[in-house]
Image (cartoon, rainbow, N blue to C red):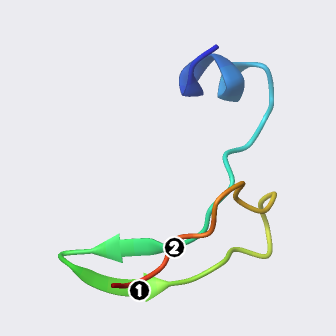
Amino acid sequence: KDMLESIHQGNLPGVGMTVIDGVVRSHRSRNTPPAETLPEVV
């Protein structure tokens, strides 16, 4: 099972962080399921 197949079946990906142009723009999403592994900034 890959990501596109999961989305096609109605499963949303967990969003842990959004990075745009190397800058963290947002952290956990309240509108999607939690991510299995939480990202961290090193």
Q: Earlier in the sequence, mark 1 or mark 2?
A: 2
Q: Which residue is mark 2?
A: 17
* Whether label 1 touches label 2, CB < 8 Å: no
In the picture as drawn, the residue positioned furthest to the front comes out as 42
Dot 2, crowdedness within 10 Å: few (<14), some or many (≥20)?
A: some
On screen, residue 12 versus residue 15, left or right, reads right
Q: Is residue 9 above or below residue 25?
A: above
Q: Which residue is mark 1?
A: 25
Residue 16 quadrant: bottom right
* Residue 41, numbered circle: none
Closest to the observer, 2 or 31: 2
Quarter of the image with the N terminus is top right
Residue 18 quadrant: bottom left
In the picture as drawn, the residue positioned furthest to the left comes out as 21
Q: Position of residue 6 (x, y in %)?
A: 69, 24
- Mark 1 vs mark 2: in front: 2
On screen, residue 41 versus residue 3, left or right, reads left
Q: Amino acid at mark 2?
A: Met
Q: Position of residue 5 (x, y in %)?
A: 63, 16
Q: Position of residue 4 (x, y in %)?
A: 56, 23
On screen, residue 10 versus residue 42, left or right, reads right
Q: Amino acid at mark 1?
A: Arg
Q: Position of residue 28 (x, y in %)?
A: 66, 78
Identified at 33% across, 85% down, the residue is 42
Identified at 79% across, 34% down, the residue is 11
Tag 1's secondary structure?
strand
Identified at 52% across, 71% down, the residue is 39
Q: Is residue 12 above or below residue 18?
A: above
Dot 1, crowdedness within 10 Å: few (<14), some or many (≥20)?
A: few
